[in-house]
Image (spheres, rainbow, N blue to C red):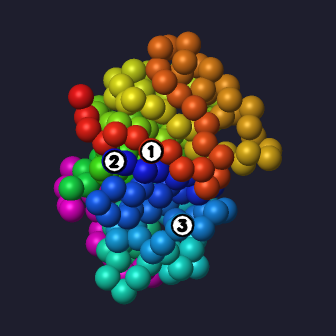
Amino acid sequence: MLEVRWLGNSCVEVVSSRRILIDPCYTVEPEAPADIILVTHEHSDHINPEHLAKARKPETRVYAPKSTLEAYGIQGTPVRGGDEFEGVKAFSVECWKAAECIAYLADGVLHAGDAADFPSTRAVVAFTACYPEYYSRYVESMLKVRPRLVVPVHYSPEKHMDRALGLVEELKRAGLEARLLKPGEKLKLSGVLD
């Protein structure tokens, strides 16, 4: 069984046989410290050093692009596109004004930070930003990935709910399953890829 929670901003908590936190900059705290922390890129709405420190335990492994680790002085393992580690696949993607950006496929969950173009891979659930000017690119990417579910993230429910709702409508119009999660809401899915 795969359990995911959107924690606000671009932060996602993934629980399967282990606990993974992606982009530790959240509005709702993780339920427990992570075994693995993955950071897509260096923007401050994707990594908050205080949140990262609170979300880890001594044995937590942190993976991020080298430029991100250096920018924040964080001890961790540098990641490049094409790397595979601990059952996680890393893909190089383009994020707006980022030095480097990595999309991760971990335990069936695909997360690409701010990227509008996702890697060609399979996923159970995909988390995507929801900027209206990139709707067509998100839809095109998701039609290639064909996840069971697409969940928009990287928006403020108080200020930009229309962005997320608009993307859900576009994804559904293209025949994809999509829905919103409230910050902190849990979603349980079967983790087996068809």
The residue that mark 3 highlights is 30
Task: Name the residue carrying label 1.
Answer: 188
Quadrant in the rendering for residue 120: top left
Q: Secondary structure at mark 1?
A: strand
What's the distance in space between the residues labelled 1 and 3, CA to CA?
16 Å
**Nearer to the camera, 148 or 40:** 148
Name the residue that disc number 2 marks: 1
**Residue found 54% across the figure and 67% down from its top:** 30
Q: Is residue 31 magenta?
A: no
Residue 112 percent coordinates (x, y): 43, 45
SS of the residue under disc 2: loop
Residue at 54% of width from left, 50% of height from top?
186
Residue 191, image quadrant = top left
Q: Is residue 39 left or right of residue 181?
A: left
Q: CA distance from mark 2 to mark 3?
A: 18 Å
Task: Tell whether 30 sits left or right of 68.
Answer: right
Q: Residues within 10 Å of mark 1 (few under 14, many from 20)?
A: few
**Which residue is painted at 37% across and 81% down in the image?**
75
**Relative height, residue 51 to residue 64 (above, below):** below
Instruction: Tell me the tag on residue 71.
Output: none
Give the mark nearer the N terminus: 2 vs 3: 2
